[in-house]
Image (cartoon, grey):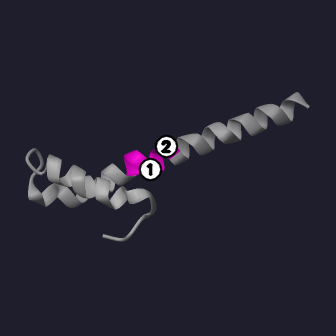
Amino acid sequence: MSPTPGGSGIGEIGALSIFDNFIGADFLGIFAILWRIVTQYLSAIIGGILFLMLIIKDAFKR
């Protein structure tokens, strides 16, 4: 585990301990990666796309 800001590592460990009962030990690493993608990167990508759309929309207004 690499240290990350905002305590997301603690959140991942908590999620892994909760989902350990439902997901086999072989898939916990994949689950941790998917968890990080969904909770952090997906929202950043969607926010970036929406931000670009607002900038383009504002540029065409002028």
Q: Against 53, is 7 above or below?
A: below
Q: Residue at x 24, y 58 (%)?
A: 13
Q: Residue at x 69, y 36 (%)?
A: 53
Q: Mark 2 and mark 1: span between their CA atoms? A: 6 Å
Query: x, y percentage for residue 8?
Result: 37, 56
Query: x, y percentage for residue 18?
Result: 16, 47
Query: x, y percentage for residue 28?
Result: 18, 57
Q: Secondary structure at mark 1?
A: helix
In the image, what residue type sits under mark 2?
A: Ser
Q: Is residue 20 magenta?
A: no
Q: Against 52, is 3 above or below?
A: below
Q: Residue at x 16, y 47 (%)?
A: 19
Which residue extends farthest bottom? 2
Alpha-carbon neighbours of circle 2 within 10 Å: few (<14), some, or many (≥20)? Answer: few
Quarter location, residue 29: bottom left
> Residue tagged by mark 1?
40
Q: Residue at x 32, y 50 (%)?
A: 35
Q: Secondary structure at mark 2?
A: helix
In the image, what residue type sits under mark 1?
A: Gln
* Left or right of residue 59, residue 10 in this image: left
Assess whether mark 1 and mark 2 are in contact (beta carbons under 8 angstroms). yes
Which residue extends farthest right? 62
Specify the quadrant that holds the N terminus: bottom left
Specify the quadrant that holds the C terminus: top right
* Left or right of residue 22, residue 44 in this image: right
Residue segment shown in magenta? 37-43
Q: Which mark is residue 5?
A: none
> Residue tagged by mark 2?
43
Query: x, y percentage for residue 4?
Result: 42, 65
Q: Principal SS element in the magenta part?
A: helix
Q: Against 24, is 55 above or below?
A: above
Which residue extends farthest top? 61
